C-alpha cells in the first residue's frame, strides 16, 4: 500500500497523526507467487496474471452470450466475487423434471450479449424453475491442489470408507477438450476415468482444462481446447473476432498463474487439534502429499496444506444438477485456503459467517452432521478457538 502525505502544510499541535488507528499492510496479502520461484516461472506468473485480469472486448471475441468479460470480475484479488454464476433447472412437483427442453441453451444463465448477438440466455419466466447461484471459489494455491498425488486421494477415499464417519468419493471425469493436457499431465481428448479436482463438484481434472472451460463458458472466449461458441438464442456460431479467439498459450499462461499463486500467509493460531477432534479434518484434510514429478519443483513431493480431501460429499443441499458422477447434493470439500479473504461462504454464498457455514453442514442427509454435533458440544471458549483458527486460514 502506497502512503501519500495527506496534508501540504505542517500539522498544527492539535492535529492527530493521520495514520492513527490504521493498520498498515506491509505486504500484499494475495496475488503473490510461490516464494523463491525461478526466473522462468516468475515470468509465466506475471504474464498469466495479466491475462487473468484482462477485460475482453468485442474486437477480441467477446460474445455471443456471456456472463462476465474477465476472470478477475468473478475472482477479484484471486478471491470470491463479485461476479457469480446462476443456474436453472426445470422442476416438476418439486423435483428436477425429466424434460428440460425448455432450456435449449443449457442450465447456465448468460445475461450479457456482444459480438452481434441480441438475445441473452435468461431463465424463462413462466415455468416452475429452481434458480440457484454458484459462488466462485478463490484461486489461491491451486497448484497445490493440482499437485496432490492421485494415490493419496484414493487412499483418503478408502480410509473414509473403512472408518465410516464420512464417505467421500472421487468424481470420475472425462477430458472433454480438443487439445491434450501434456505439460502437467498426460490427458488426451476423450480420456475418461480421470480424478476430477476443480469446480464446486470437482468436474475438471486440471487447471489448463478449467481455464479453457472458464474462458468459453463464463466469458465466451474460444480456444483450441474449446473451439466452438456455445449454443445461443441468436444461433450465432461466431462473433466479431473470426474463428478461435485466443491462443492455447494464453490458456496455459492463465493456468500457470493459478498454479504459481501462493497460499496467503497464515497466522499461527491454536485450534488445529479441536478441528481434528470435532471431525472437520475428516473431510478438510489439513494436508495431502503431492506428486514427486509435478513440474513446478517447489510443489513436488511436499505436504500440501489445502484443508480438503478433494472428494465429493453429500451435504444435503441440492441444486438439482449433476456434474459427471456428482449428484445434485454432492459437493467437493471446499479447500480452506485464504478463507479470511472471503466475504461469504458455501457454494451459494448462503452463509455470512464461518459459524453459519458450519451450522449449514447439518442439513438433513449431510455427511457432516456428527461433526456439527461435536462442534455444538464444545464449550463456548473452545468454539471460539476453533472459529478463530478457521477464520485465520
Ligand atoms: C462469471 C463469473 C466467473 C468468471 C468470469 C470466471 N469464473 Fe472461475 N469460477 C466461477 C464459479 C461460479 C466457479 C465454480 C464453478 C462450478 O464449479 O460450477 C469457478 C471456479 C473456478 C475454478 C475452480 C477452482 C477450484 O478450486 O475448484 C478455477 C480454477 C477458475 N474458476 C478459474 C477461472 C479462470 C482462469 C477464469 C478466466 C478465464 C475464470 N475462472 C472466470 C466464476 C467465474
Ligand atoms: C462430510 C465432510 C465435511 C465435514 C465433516 C466438514 N466439512 Fe466443511 N465443507 C464440506 C464441503 C463438501 C463443503 C462445501 C459445501 C458447499 O460449498 O456448499 C464445505 C465447506 C466448508 C466451509 C465454507 C468454505 C467456503 O469456501 O465457502 C467452511 C468454513 C467449512 N466447511 C468448515 C468446516 C468446519 C469448521 C468443520 C468442522 C466443524 C467442517 N467444515 C466439517 C465438507 C465437510
Image: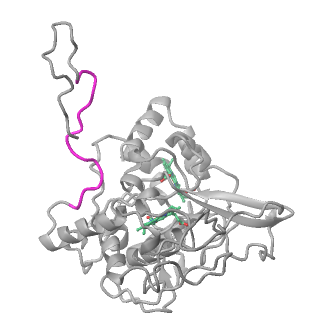
Q: Is residue 74 magenta?
A: no
Furthest residue in direction right, as rendered: 93
Q: Is residue 114 above or below residue 383?
A: below
Q: Main secondary structure of the magenta part?
A: loop
Q: In the figure, is residue 390 to the left or right of 316?
A: left
Quadrant (top left/top right/bottom left/bottom right) for the N terminus? top left
Q: Is residue 33 magenta?
A: yes
Q: Position of residue 27 (x, y in %)?
A: 21, 45
Q: Position of residue 49 (x, y in %)?
A: 29, 64
Quadrant for residue 25, please give it.
Answer: top left
Closer to the camera in the image, 262 or 106: 106
**Residues in magenta, as a range:** 19-34
Q: Position of residue 179 (x, y in %)?
A: 42, 89
Q: In the figure, is residue 254 to the left or right of 275?
A: left
Q: Is residue 155 visible?
A: no
Residue at image coords 87%, 63% = 93
Q: In the figure, is residue 52 to the left or right of 14?
A: right
Amino acid at each position: 500500500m502506497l502512503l501519500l502525505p495527506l496534508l501540504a502544510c505542517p500539522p498544527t499541535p492539535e492535529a492527530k497523526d493521520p495514520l492513527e488507528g490504521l493498520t498498515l499492510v506491509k505486504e500484499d496479502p494475495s496475488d503473490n507467487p510461490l516464494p523463491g520461484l525461478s526466473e522462468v516461472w516468475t515470468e509465466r506468473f506475471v504474464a498469466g496474471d495479466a491475462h487473468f485480469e484482462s477485460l475482453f472486448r468485442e474486437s477480441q471475441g467477446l460474445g455471443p452470450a456471456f456472463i462476465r468479460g474477465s476472470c478477475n470480475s468473478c475472482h477479484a484479488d484471486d478471491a470470491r466475487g463479485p461476479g457469480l454464476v446462476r443456474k436453472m433447472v426445470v422442476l416438476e412437483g418439486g423435483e428436477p423434471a425429466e424434460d428440460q427442453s425448455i432450456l435449449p441453451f443449457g442450465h447456465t444463465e448468460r445475461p450479457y450479449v456482444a459480438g452481434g448477438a441480441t438475445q441473452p440466455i435468461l431463465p424463462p419466466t413462466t415455468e416452475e424453475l429452481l434458480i440457484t447461484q454458484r459462488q466462485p471459489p478463490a484461486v489461491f494455491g491451486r497448484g497445490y491442489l493440482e499437485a496432490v498425488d492421485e494415490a493419496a486421494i484414493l487412499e483418503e477415499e478408502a480410509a473414509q470408507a473403512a472408518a465410516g464417519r464420512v464417505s467421500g468419493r472421487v468424481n470420475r471425469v472425462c477430458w472433454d477438450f480438443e487439445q491434450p493436457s501434456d505439460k502437467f499431465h498426460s490427458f488426451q481428448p476423450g480420456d475418461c476415468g480421470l480424478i476430477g479436482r476443480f469446480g464446486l463438484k470437482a468436474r475438471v481434472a486440471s487447471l489448463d482444462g478449467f481455464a479453457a472451460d472458464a474462458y468459453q463458458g463464463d466469458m465466451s472466449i474460444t480456444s483450441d481446447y474449446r473451439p466452438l461458441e456455445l449454443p445461443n438464442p441468436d444461433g450465432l456460431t461466431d462473433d466479431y473476432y473470426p474463428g478461435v479467439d485466443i491462443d492455447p498459450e494464453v490458456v496455459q499462461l492463465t493456468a500457470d498463474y493459478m498454479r504459481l499463486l501462493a497460499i496467503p500467509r497464515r497466522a499461527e493460531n491454536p485450534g488445529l487439534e479441536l478441528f481434528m477432534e470435532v471431525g472437520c479434518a475428516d473431510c478438510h484434510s489439513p494436508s495431502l502429499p503431492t506428486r514427486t514429478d509435478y513440474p513446478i519443483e517447489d510443489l513436488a513431493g511436499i505436504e500440501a496444506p489445502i484443508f480438503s480431501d478433494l472428494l465429493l460429499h453429500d451435504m444435503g443441499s441440492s441444486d438439482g444438477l449433476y456434474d459427471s458422477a456428482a449428484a445434485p447434493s454432492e459437493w467437493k470439500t471446499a479447500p480452506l485456503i485464504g478463507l479470511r479473504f472471503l466475504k461469504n461462504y458455501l457454494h451459494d454464498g448462503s452463509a455470512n459467517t464461518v459459524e453459519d457455514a458450519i451450522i449449514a453442514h447439518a442439513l438433513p442427509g449431510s455427511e457432516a452432521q456428527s461433526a456439527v454435533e461435536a462442534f455444538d458440544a464444545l464449550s463456548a471458549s473452545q468454539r471460539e478457538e476453533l472459529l478463530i483458527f478457521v477464520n485465520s486460514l
